[in-house]
Amino acid sequence: MTKIKAVIFDWAGTLVDFGSFAPMGVFVKCFEQFGITATIEQARAPMGLPKWHHIRAMMDDEDITAQWQAKYGHAPTDADVDEIYKIFVPMNEKVAADHAGLVPGALETIAWLRARGIKIGSTTGYTRSIMEHVLPVVKAQGFVPDNLVCADDLAEGRPGPLGMYQSFVDLAVYPPSAVIKVDDTVPGLQEGVAAGCITVGLALSGNFVGKTPEELDAMPAHEVAKLRDAASKLLNQGGADHVIDTVADLPALIETL
């Protein structure tokens, strides 16, 4: 087996919040406060980006831009993004904590990695203030990461590699080819690609499927397979070297590398 020195995980849709639900309703509610109707699909589309850039991407959606133009007489500006972002962050702080349950199998995977001396890092599109609400909830479930890089910690976030570079320093691991980046979103995978890491996409626990474990269990196998295939295609196109269902499947994949 190739020596893997560290695994850098994403958070929502990867380690916690199966289905990546926490930010969705908050984005919709924030836009509602400005008289703009945003759909869950529009809110999910830029998932994985730092949240300011996520809002900017939503503002650039043709429908949302048209609504903003009609209501305010101009296309949405960065200053308008700032105003929505000011509302979003405090709203998301509580919601993210409410959705901070670990994905089934996460603790077992973490134990498997630690038993082999593999370090466990993390990056996220969440701000540091949001993660300060998430971390105590996760710690109570038995997990503390070896490092955490948040969207507002560095001058540039995803899809650039700076969060991964910071993780290499924090964890004292190199070369990049000895590090795995695990994520359910394209910007998060591209972060790993840009840093030269092995990238692993998650098909069923993340943003592209957007279902709870209970919803997936209640679905016929062929319908789940369709969701898996569609998500896998998008993840592969986004830069995933490998695609698995959830983090519970990571140990088996690592054994094959």
Image (cartoon, rainbow, N blue to C red):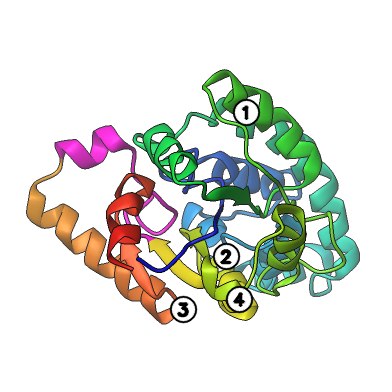
Identify which residue is drawn at 61% across, 76% down.
62
Q: Position of residue 178 (x, y in %)?
A: 53, 69
**For the residues carrying marks 3 and 1, which lies nearer the camera in this image?**
3
Residue 14, which numbered label? none
Name the quadrant of the C terminus.
bottom left
Tell me, yes or no, whether the highlighted magenta stretch contains residue 194.
no
Q: Is residue 236 above or below residue 23?
A: below
**For the residues carrying marks 3 and 4, which lies nearer the camera in this image?**
3
Q: Is residue 183 above or below residue 32?
A: below
Image check: 157 left or right of 27?
A: right
Q: Is residue 174 above or below residue 193?
A: above
**For the residues carrying marks 4 and 2, which lies nearer the camera in this image?**
2
Mark 2 belongs to which amino acid? Gly
**For the residues carrying marks 1 and 2, which lies nearer the camera in this image?**
2
Instruction: Please tell me whether mark 3 sits on a helix, a strand or a loop.
Output: loop
Residue assigned mark 2: 188
Q: Position of residue 60 (x, y in %)?
A: 68, 74
Q: Which residues are magenta?
A: 202-218
Whether residues under marks 1 and 2 lie with C-beta atoms below 8 angstroms apart, the answer is no
Q: How many marks?
A: 4
Q: Disc 3 and disc 4: Cα gap in Å? A: 26 Å
